[in-house]
Amino acid sequence: DIGDIVRGKDLYLGKKKKKQNEKETERDQLESKLKEIFQQIHSGLSKNGAEARYGSDTKNFYQLREDWWTANRATVWKAITCNAKGFNYFRQTACNGGSPTKGYCRRDGDQVPTYFDYVPQFLR
């Protein structure tokens, strides 16, 4: 799940084997890249109490990652689903028997299905 990966809470750690001539697994490479990205974001924080909130969050940036996901999850969801027309394996109706999704795998109004984020991953 993308939210779990971004937040550093993904339970699936990927293949344990390294590719030939590689020093890290694909999962390790992904985590390193995410740390690099959030390091850049962290180094640019200096306003409105951000230093106090994220000051000690300098190794894995879990608090920053959590806050970033909260702020950007709707944008990420829209980016993932904006061209998902015609995929029949997605539900074609909104939750609770609502109106059709008009060919997209998201609800009308671009609402993110929140139940994915708040159910622990091992229960999904």
Image: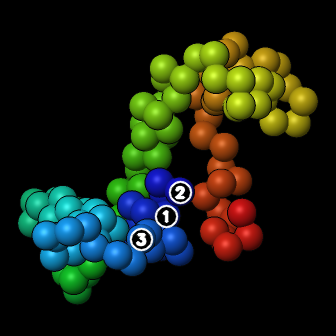
**Residue located beneath label 3 in the image:** 15
Question: Considering the numbered disc 1 on the image, is that residue within a helix, a strand or a loop?
Answer: helix
**Discs 1, 2 touching: Cβ within 8 Å:** yes
**Discs 3, 1 touching: Cβ within 8 Å:** no
Q: Please state the horizontal and vertical placement of residue 122, each as a whole percent of the image.
A: 67, 73
Q: How many marks?
A: 3
| Cα distance in 3D space between marks 1 and 2 | 5 Å
Q: Quadrant of residue 39?
A: bottom left
| Residue sitting farthest toward the bottom | 56
**Residue located beneath label 2 in the image:** 1
Q: Earlier in the sequence, mark 3 or mark 1?
A: 1
Q: Please state the horizontal and vertical placement of residue 20, each as a whole percent of the image.
A: 20, 68
Q: Earlier in the sequence, mark 3 or mark 2?
A: 2
Of residues 51 and 89, the one nearer the viewer is 89
Q: Quadrant of residue 40?
A: bottom left
- Mark 1 nearby-residue class (10 Å; few <14, some 14–19, many ≥20): some
Q: Nearer the viewer, mark 3 or mark 2?
A: 3
| Residue sitting farthest toward the front | 20
Q: Residue at x 49, y 64 (%)?
A: 4
Residue 4: numbered disc: 1
Question: Considering the numbered disc 2 on the image, is that residue within a helix, a strand or a loop?
Answer: loop
The kind of residue on which mark 3 rests is Lys
| Cα distance in 3D space between marks 3 and 1 | 17 Å
Question: Considering the numbered disc 3 on the image, is that residue within a helix, a strand or a loop?
Answer: loop
The kind of residue on which mark 2 rests is Asp
